[in-house]
Amino acid sequence: MSDSEAAPPRLSRTAFPAPSAPIRIVHLGLGAFHRAHQAWYTAHAHDADGWGIAAFTGRRPDAAEVLAEQGGLYTLIERGPDGDRDEVVTSLVEAVDGADTARLVELFRVPELAVVTLTVTEAGYRLDDAGRPDLADAELSSDLAALRAAIRRGDPLEATTPATTLGRLLTGLESRRRAGGGPLAVVPCDNLPRNGPFVGRGLTEAAREVDDGLARFVSGSVAFVSTSVDRITPRVTEADVDAFNARAERLDRSPVITEPFADWVLSGHFPAGRPAWEDAGARFVDDIEPWERRKLWLLNGAHTLLALAGPARGHETVAEAIGDPVLRGAVAAFWGEAVRHLPAELETAAYRDALLARFDNARIEHRLAQIAQDSDRKVALRIVPVAEAELRAGRTASGCAFALAAWLDSSRSDAAGDPRARIGRLSPLLAGNAGFMRTVMTAPKAGDPSLSTAALRMEDGTPVARLQ
């Protein structure tokens, strides 16, 4: 092979000179979304050279192994409707196997550590709906018992092997407590309402199960920040990697594909400081709840509806599903109900228009099967609250009923059986409303080939086609 035909260099901090910022952020849950979102925001802060991230994987070490070979560098591919924009993100300075407890406790002892961010999915926290640790979970109980024993015996924490997010986070915080470390902020970035207090309650109660001293440290030295995060980031396939490297100036075994849009709303206190994320467009607000509801209901709720109803109509991606007039109408009906319970200052009309444009972007292959995972919990967070609010207002919640009917019909729902009982596990209010249950049971089937938007109407009889 001649020099002119030589393969491009592998992405590294030598091939792409980039200084490593000091580690002041630890992230748990290294994945594509973290790299498209929090790491990207950190890289775009004006003080990025002072805020390096060490990110730990969850169950598998694969991502850490590949990224470690690249010095933490990766290419972010912003895939718009008309083309791609590539950017090498430099804020991730260390990628670590989540099972590496020794490195975890070492980093938590660093006095300069100021922020711990989390992306572990809603179910990954192993908390019940009230935010209490699920002590019936065998792995979580084992992690707490092992940490309890290590504290009582004074054993080195490096010898423990926590497998859960709460177990790893508490192990890190115990390391910081032993070292006399100062306060820091924990920032969950998952789709949970009021995720800061929710995770804070769970972590504090888990700490009480372990040791009173650790519980006092968590209560007194850890601030919990609530967030609303938004950036569609589909899984990257081997074909995506090969296609990128066929045109790349530097070979990258772990690029991330995402949309141009990004949004981050935060509310809370950072006792040891934070990057200037607002430079990249992050917003800091006093009351995050309306922003959470807007994102959970309008974006995530629509995603869940499409993921449950789309496959029955032969669709595999969000773009395919939203291009189906019936499903576009069903989303419009659900949105029409949801926006009644959102403040006008959130500019929901403009947000919905932007969402449709994002959903229509067929170059982002956001697969419905990915969104449909853990659908019971997602329905409970994204659809049920809107339905309950509509019923309390004296309306039928027919848009929500269509989504719940699709959930009942979907093979992804955990258990077959009585629809009232299944809905009752999510909401006694909905299951106890005979009129709503009739609406669910008589809702048009998503897979019915004769279904049209004429069958989907709002409370006042307005056809949903007029709402699009």
Image (cartoon, rainbow, N blue to C red):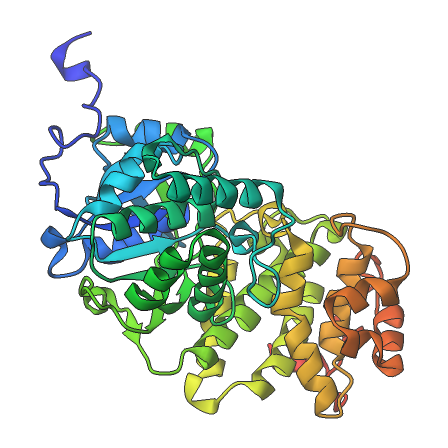
Above-or-below relation of 396 to 437? below
- Residue toward you, 25 or 446: 25
Front position in the image: 155 or 63: 155
* Whole-percent x, y for residue 267 in the image: 34, 74
Residue closer to the observer: 349 or 256:
256
Q: Is residue 145 left or right of residue 92?
A: right
Residue 300 vs residue 195, the one in the foreground: 195
Q: Is residue 416 visible?
A: yes
Which quadrant holds the N terminus? Answer: top left
Outermost residue, top direction?
A: 1
Quadrant assignment for the C terminus = bottom right
Residue 269 location (% of width, % of height):
28, 72
Work out whether residue 261 can be spotted. Answer: no
Left or right, residue 448 beside residue 196: right
Rendered location of residue 264, percent (x, y): 35, 67
x, y percentage for residue 330? 69, 70
Residue at x 12%, y 46% (from the top left corner): 21
**Residue 232, above or below 403:** above
Task: Specify the quadrant of the image occupied by residue 182.
Answer: bottom left
Residue at the image point whose x is 77% and y is 79% from the top: 429
How many numbered markers are drawn?
A: 0
* Quadrant in the rendering for residue 160: top left
In the rendered image, the residue lying farthest to the front is 153
In the displayed structure, 346 sits above or below 74; it is below
- Res. 280 image quadrant: bottom left
